[in-house]
Every structure is written in C-alpha cells, then in structure tokens.
Image (tube, rainbow, N blue to C red):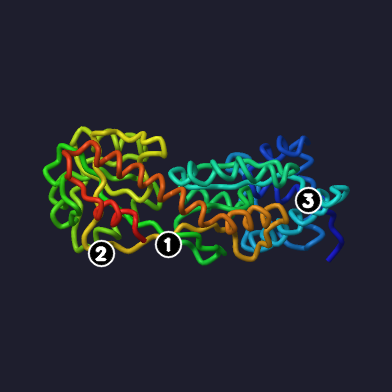
Amino acid sequence: MSEFTLRQLKYFVTAAEVGTLRLAAEKLFVSPSTVSSAITELEQALGERLCIRRQSYGLSLTPGGEVFFREARKVVRDVENLRYALGRNGELRGPLHIGCYPSLSPVFFSRVLSDFPRQHPGIDLSILEASQDELLQRMSEGHVDLSIMYDFELPDDLEYVRLFDLRPYVLLSTEHPLATRDAVSLTELAPEPFILMNMSPSVEHTYSVFREAGAVPHILYQTSKPELVKSLVAKNVGYSIRLQPIGDRLGNLDRRLAMLPLTPEPSALQIVVAWPRGVRPSERAQAMLDFIVAHRRDFEFDMVEVQQWSFATASDALPPGALSSDAVAGLTAG
C-alpha cells in the first residue's frame, strides 16, 4: 500500500457525502476533474476501488468504500478539530450542527440559543429541524453532530442519553361530546374519524399506542403539518393524538381544542440526545451534550409548564368545572 494524503481523504469523504463530483467540487472550490483525480490517486494508493462514478447517476460507494468512508470521515473530522484547537487559548471554536424534531425545538432551542452562546461564544452554532428519519440520515452522513429526538425504534448504530419522558394525550374539539370527560379511552374513540400526524416517528408511535390499547384507528386524513392537525380537530372534523404541547407559556391555545389524558395510561416515550455510535463527539459537541444533560430538568420543567398552560387554557374553553384539577394533574404526571 502506497502513502495517501489528507487532501485525497478530504476530497473522497466530501464526494461520498454529497453524492456527486460536481457538488463536491463546488463545496471544495475546485473542479470536478480535480476531485476525480484525487479519488483515483487514493484508490491506487490503497489498491482497492472505493466508488463507482457515473456521469448520469453520480457516485456510489463499493462495499469496501463504505467501510473506508466511515473511518476516513473520522480522520477528516479529527484533523478539522485539531485545526480549531490551535490558537484558541482554551476557548472552543468552530462549527456545531444540532438537529431536533420540530415540535421539540421551541422548548430546547429557546434555552440553547439564549444560554449556550454565552458560555461558548467561539462556537458557530447551526440548527436543523427535521423528521426523525432525516435527522438519522444527516447524522450518518456527518452533517449533524447531535440530535434531540424520541427514543422510538432508534437504530443500533446510535449512542444516546435519556433526558425525560412524555406521555401521549388525546386532542379533541371542545364541541366533541367527550370533551368534558376527565379522561377518554381509544376504544371509545376508535370508530370516529382520526387525523394522523404523518411524520416519523409520530405515525409509527401513534399506531403503537392504538395497538397497546387494542384499538384500530379510522384514519380520515394524514398530514405532516401540526397546524393542520390542530385546525381540523378544532373544526371537529376528527380527533388526534399528541405527545407535544399545543400551547405556550402565554396561553396561546386555540380555545376550540380540548386536551384529555388517555385511559388506561399508555406507555411513556423518552426524549433523548443522540449521536452516531463509534464517532467520538468533538469537544464542541461534547460541550453541547454536557449543557443539555446539565439542564435536562430545566427542559423537562419548560415542557411541563407549557403543557400546564395548554391544559389550563383548554379547560377555560370548556364549561365551568368540566375539567377538574385532578384531571389536569393527571395530564402532566409522568
């Protein structure tokens, strides 16, 4: 095996991440032929073909290329971290990419974006709100360092730290006959039209909640837009299941909506912060991980506080006494 260079590694890793020589060249500010030549030189040094390059279909890795790519990406990252470490005088510097499931981001990022930069002003923080499938993909590609997500059917190639639990509840119109109940069962609601939040992992988790209750939903509409779910439920088109709060600490909840706990109580779902297994977090990512874990109770309190505002506002929309204080306590328990 001949020697190869860091430049060749970087060009190969970039091309593998973006999928085409043209996009890699644009990202590296060189020509596509320069990227192609660097990869060819790397393959000759290793004595193995790493990828297949087709002009019409982009770049695809061979089985050996997949293995080499995972290790090469670690090397390139470590070198980049070493570069940022030089001359920082003890201050962390460089980019940090954090992902989050959209409905969780208001609680997490309001505190992260206000407090974390004061502790680490040299870190260039960027955030991505995306479905769980996209977050997993972006982490595997090396574009996201850490992600805040649900611990639901997570792959084995992740490391994660558990933060706190959430339990699902039912979202009804205040015009619904069951809206004045203290709690409701899915077996009662199952024959009625259901509005499905069709975003991973919400859709998979929703089906699991119904299976646990021994019920089958009658799905009327599917959408990936939380606001549309709320709008349809508010108009009494159907009901839905939610994990996240639907109001905020200012009480901004559509007064046509009611939130009820499920009976029997379904299993809780954990909120986690995750990163790829086998990839050592950079010092910047470790600083963010330490920050999130240190403030996990604050995040949990913020989430429950938002829920309390939501439940309180929902009860204001109902007739007096329709939702007892015990019911509100039960909604926020766990």
Above or below residue 280? Residue 141 is above
Residue 307, given in percent of the width and then of the height, sits at 36, 47
Residue 174, given in percent of the width and then of the height, sits at 19, 38
Classed neighbour count for the residue bearing mark 1: other residues with Cα under 10 Å, few (<14), some (14–19), many (≥20): few
Q: Is residue 278 left or right of residue 226?
A: right
Residue that appears at 58% across and 59% down: 293
Q: Nearer the viewer, residue 240 or 41?
A: 240
Residue that appears at 50% across and 60% down: 163
Q: Which residue is mark 1?
A: 153
- Callout 1 touching callout 2 (CB < 8 Å): no
Q: Earlier in the sequence, mark 3 or mark 2?
A: 3
Q: Which residue is mark 3?
A: 80
- Callout 3 touching callout 1 (CB < 8 Å): no
Q: Nearer the viewer, residue 113 or 318?
A: 318
Q: Which residue is mark 2?
A: 212
Q: Is residue 279 left or right of residue 174?
A: right
Amino acid type of disc 2?
Glu
Residue 46, given in percent of the width and then of the height, sits at 78, 62
